[in-house]
Image: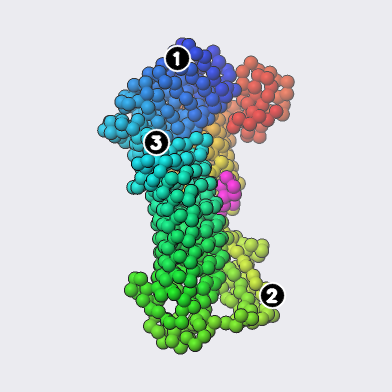
Amino acid sequence: MTNYDNNGYTVPWSSYSMLMTTVVLPEGITSIGTGAFAFCSYLTSVNIPSTVTTIGDRVFASCSKLPSISLPEGLDSIGYKAFSGCSKLTSITIPSTVTAIGEKAFESCTGLRSITCLAPLPPTLGANVFYCINKFPVIVVVPKNSRALYLADDQWNDFSTIVGMTDMCGDHLFWTLQDSVLTISGTGAMYNFTATDSVPWIPLHANEIAHVVIQDGVTDIGPHAFSQCSNLRFVSIPQTVKAIGLEAFFFCRKLSSVNLPDSLTTIGDYAFADCSGLTSVAIPQGVTTISRAAFSSCSSLTSVTIPDSVTSIGDYAFGDCYALPSITLPQALKTIGKYAFAGCLALTDITIPANVTSIGNYCFNRCQNLTTFYLLNPIPFYMDQYGIGVTLAFRWEMSGQQPDFSIYVPCGTLTAYLQKNGWNGYRSQLKYQPNPDYVEHIVHLTVQDTLQGAAEVTQTIIPSACDSFVNSICTIEATAYEGYHFLRWNDGETANPRDIQLTQDTSLFAEFIGKCGENLFWNITGDSLCFYGDGDMYSFADPAPWASQLQQLHMLLLAPEMTSIAEVAFLGATNLTSVIIPGLVTHIGAKAFMQCSELTSVSFGSLLQQMDDSAFAYCPAIQTMVSYNTTPPAVGTDAFLDVPRTSVLFVPASSVDTYRQHTVWGQFDVRPLDATAIDDSNGITASRPQLLLQNGSIYLLMPDSSRYSLTGQKLR
């Protein structure tokens, strides 16, 4: 193929570059020429034939929507900036025949998470092949016997994770992955994996696995075996499995149910920790110990069956199982570890069997609705497995007040408990077991956790024991943590604190939104980050409070009356495609939109005066900008670093010359803002795509008179 200019302006199909979604190359082609498909920003599919041995310079540069590409065996070299700016590319397989990769070949491929290099000898890399890529999360998979060579190669060993390919997962066990189903077959135990990265399928396929089938013959599920398989929904465990290892299903948040086989005798520490989608579990009869944190943070768990064989519940075993409303402890149970039920917010009462003689510190910490303990042991024990006693067993850690609860002991034992060391610290809570006909009504208060730990209810007043609620009044108050703001109660009431008159058992929830300015607030709805109020945004010394959720963000709705955007506010929002800066914003902070790699269009309001250093750096997909200010705003160092200078900048018609003469703004393709309105363009025809403007929004007019938004949506 002919070599064209670096930007693809001279290729014969340049006028169709905004329309092309698929490229098919026939067998017989041996090279793809320089710049052949550069800036084909809607390209999503490419077929490269087996005859191609050379991919030239900047062949697919800035193809920002290309999600994947298959390189043929026989390929020898990849040219300079061949895939630069392909920010949607998540994985690439480099054939075994490739010996050299050109300078900056994959720069700014910010979505890249895995590289499979089949070459037995590490290919030679030009300078900055993976420039502007965070190499820490990228997994490099190489031939099994070549891993040491890649680790010793100065050009490859700056990747933190390099693994060798293998299909073994035990001395006599094998694994296969097909169509998101991972199958483990053979006999015996899995390897004793020392860490998540040592599990052969996790570094490259953790997010791909949806179903695990463990076949008959497997006896042990190894440590970390399916840890952090975030899309795992189903698992089949045969009757031959006896043990589930440490963190085997840790952080499998989409796993909603699991059938544990009757053959099972051991559940390792953290085995199902943070399986937040798990709703029910039945532990088999052969299990005697529920290990440390085995089901901690299973926040959707509502049903647990514990067999009579269990004699010990470990530390944190069911900690932060927020939704668990009740649990029946087996009669054979002897010890309960520290924090075992801490944070079980839905628990209201629990019966502790007669054989229990040890309860760990803060076992029921933060169980804010747990008001009743039924203690069946007629002998008041003291020492626990830590040699400390029950002094702290029912208390809350770091709490200034002892929680309000009742401990009901067997009839005739109250005096013995009141006089026993450790138990005498609960004098006001110890009582005889109540009459079963007695009815006590309670108001339950919890937090509507709209922003992950936003606030807590600070005062709950429960009516004294009675059979009716006549004239029973209680006062409740919710207090926001720093950085959050009380919004309303779930019944619509906005008063806080508030008095309520009780006529029945009542549940209330407090709702909160984030606070990011003196009168500026934020919330996330679906995949949209929304702002409300007015004034300046706070400066953030640390990442913005919404930073952990930026990867889910597809839409940004800024408040019309906000006046500034703080530094690093939206750094790394890689799914954000367009931004409209409100008209009252005068200042955009440093790195505010840095590394927004999918951002294609930006509109600046008429009052913008200053944007700081690197404000839009590494946004290689920007194609269109609109500035309504007649005076070019001041621009900090590297504010538009890596933004294509071919991007079109629309400005007021009277200010075109002023912008063109500006040292930074003048680098772009400056055009007058008063373009043809789309409603007035009926009947217009063109031999190549044209830009149209309607109320500040830019559209594409195609040669066939169809119209598209700059995000690729067909309008008519």
Of the 4 image quadrants, the one containing the C terminus is top right
Disc 3 from disc 1: Cα separation:
30 Å
**Amino acid type for the residue under numbered disc 1:** Thr
Instruction: Specify few, some or many for label 2: CA neighbours under 10 Å numbering under 14, 14-19, or 20 or more.
Output: few
Q: Nearer the viewer, mark 3 or mark 1?
A: 3
Residue 243 spot, x, y in % from top left:
41, 53
For residue 167, the mark is 3
Relative placement, left or right, of 682 versus 460 is right
Disc 2 from disc 1: Cα separation:
81 Å
Q: Residue, x 46% and y 82% (percent of image)?
A: 378
Q: Nearer the viewer, residue 382 or 274?
A: 382
- The answer to which of marks 3 and 1 sits earlier in the sequence is 1
Q: Nearer the viewer, residue 167 or 224?
A: 167
Instruction: Reply yes or no: does residue 212 show up in magenta.
Output: no
Instruction: Reply yes or no: does residue 528 show up in magenta.
Output: yes
Residue receiving disc 1: 51
**Amino acid type for the residue under numbered disc 3:** Asp
Residue receiving disc 2: 503
- Magenta stretch? 518-532
